Structure formats: structure tokens, C-alpha cells
Amino acid sequence: MGVLLHPVVYYGQNVQVAPLFGARQKKALSVEDRQRIDETLKAYETGLKDLASWDRREHRIPVFEKFDLDTLVRKARIFLETVEQADSDIPRPFMIAVAGGTASGKTTVCEYLTEKGFPKQGHATTGWKKKVHGPLVNHLSLDHYYKDFEKRRKAMGDTAFFHNTNVDTPRALTMAVARRHLKHLKEGKAVRTPDYDMHDSTRQNRASLKVPTPFFLVEGLFALADEGIRDLMEMSLYVGVDRKTQSERWWKRAASRGLTKESGKALHDNSMRRHDQNVEPTKKHADIVVDSRAELYQLNEAMRRLSQVLLQNFYPKTHRGNR
């Protein structure tokens, strides 16, 4: 699956997308530009501090196990300076990685942010660019970048396949393609992404069109495993989960995917083992870590407050459209 090869209409403009889109010129930052960026960063830092204080004050066990304020502000400065320097009115997406183990709640976080946290439709006026019209958030799951295992799985049978095939590793995905697509999206270019069917481990003969939006969520077990992908993110979350809860959620999902008890056990045991080897170590790269003991209502409220901090500081005059 490659990038789109023709222009698309994006925020009312004809956008040439990769590989036809040329390099943008950068303009020098003026004193006024730097002052505006400093003011935005100060307000952003205050908003993040207030969020962390609320969490510690309201919860016996805080939702946020880790909250790296300095790194978040540093990344935001790079983001704002890049936006200001770009010779284009096309928004540069503020990218947010949502990582964590299987059945940890990554999708729940992304669904909350896309459905309730950020407006699905509307327009926003930034302090440094023209009005933005259209969707304010989009979402990409790295699950769709898994390699096609259909032939191997059919030849081996489900139980043997899941027992002997490590699908919980970055090597099971086409990470280079995902990295390239995210880079294009970061540059304001639309891409066609793969469509993967987890039920039978196949890459479908179709693609999904993804366009960049002001906020862009990147979800996956290995959203923090690849340095090139990490470098594209303005914020990274890791959703923790305890093993008992993870296992219970996993089995509920397995039933919906038609796995037998035998094949399900093979995949379950492999997934739990590989989590410790390949997923948990990426937690160290997260700016924000969600404590595994957080209740869903606490997590939702924390995500609501986090999205408000982002909207108020990067798109402060947001008008919500149809939900």
C-alpha cells in the first residue's frame, strides 16, 4: 500500500500529496513569532501542571503513573516553531502515540478522544495560522500494518501457527511503511493505508484513505517501539494494565474472533510472554503513563481534561460541529 498519487481536497485546498508534493520553504522566525510561541508554551505548561495537580489531588492512586512535563513542553516548542516556519496554511498534525499491551485499553482511550475529547467536525482558529475547517482529529491503528500470514496460518493450522509464530513483535509489522506513511501525514499529505483482518491474519485487497488533521492519534502495541515513529510524536501515552485484567479482556476478545480454546491458549500464552519481552520495555519512551489500576471513569475524565488542555492552547477558538 502506498501513498495517494493525486491531489485531494483538504480543508478547502487542493493538496498535492506524496510523492508529488514538493519541499516547503521555511521562513525565519520574527521576534513577534517567538513571543507568541513563548506565550502559548507558558499557557500549555500551566494547563499540564493543573492537570497533573488535579490528578494527584482527586485520586488516591493517580491516573498518571508518569507525567513528563519537561519533555512535553520541549516537544511542543519544536512543534510550534515548525508550524510557524512552514510556508503553508495546511495544519501540521499534533501527533499523539497511544501504546500499551494487548487488551490494555489503548482503543478505549483513542475512541474516547475521537468521539468525545476532540470535535469530530468543526473549525478552529489558531494563534499563528488561518482558520482550519474540517475534522479536527483522525486515528490510525498500526494493527493494519501487520504482514500477511494467511498462507502460513492455513498451512500450519491455528494452534501450531500461534504456538510457533511470534506476531507480538515489531518484526511482524511493516514498520518501515508505517513510518513513511506517518511522515507523509506529518507533512500534510494524505495516504492510503493497508486494511488488515485480524480474524484470519490477512492483508485485505483494499486501502483506507487517511488525511492529516490538527490532532492525529497513532495507536498500537509498538507505537513507541520505533525511533523514527517516536520522533514524529508531540505526545506519547502508554496505557498500563495488570496481568489479570489483561488476560480476562484478552479471552473476551478471542471469543469474538472465533478462536478455539486450544488455539486461543496458544496465542494467549505467546502474547503474554511477548508482552514482557517486546511491549513493556517501550513504556520507558512514554511521556505519560496511565496507571494500570485506574478505573475507566477516572481515565475518561483524565482524557477529557487532557484534550481540553490541547484544544485551548493549540486551537483556542475551536467551534464544535456535528458530533
Image: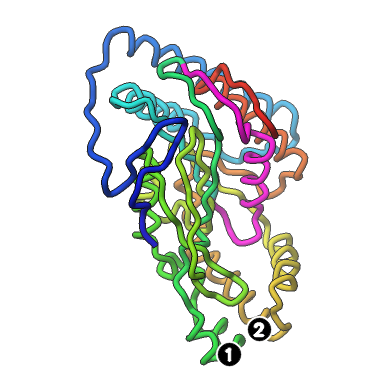
On the image, the x and y values in percent for residue 259 come to 69, 79
On the image, the x and y values in percent for residue 322 come to 68, 32
Q: Look at the picture and state if 265 lies above or below 235.
A: below
Q: Work out whether residue 306 or residue 111 is closer to the camera in this orientation and state it.
A: 111
Q: What amino acid type should be assigned to the residue bearing mark 1? A: Gly
Q: Which residue position is annotated with label 1?
A: 157
Callout 1 environment at 10 Å: few (<14), some (14 to 19), or many (20+)? few
Q: Work out whether residue 225 or residue 7 is closer to the camera in this orientation and state it.
A: 7
- Residue at 45 percent of width and 40 percent of height: 212
Left or right for 231, reference 53: left
Label for residue 265?
none
Q: Work out whether residue 72 or residue 152 is closer to the camera in this orientation and state it.
A: 152
Left or right for 323, reference 96: right
- Residue at 43 percent of width and 19 percent of height: 130
Can residue 69 be spotted in the picture? Answer: yes
Quarter placement of the C terminus: top right
Q: Which residue position is annotated with label 2?
A: 263
Cβ–Cβ under 8 Å for marks 2 and 1: yes
Quarter placement of the N terminus: bottom left
Location of residue 303 (image quadrant): top right
Q: Which segment did they paint magenta?
A: 99-126
What is the CA distance from the residue labelled 2 to the residue labelled 1? 9 Å
SS at mark 2 in the image = helix
Left or right for 93, reference 257: left
Q: Is residue 117 magenta?
A: yes
Can residue 118 be spotted in the picture? Answer: no
Q: Look at the picture and state if 278 lies above or below 227.
A: below
Q: Look at the picture and state if 195 lies above or below 294.
A: below
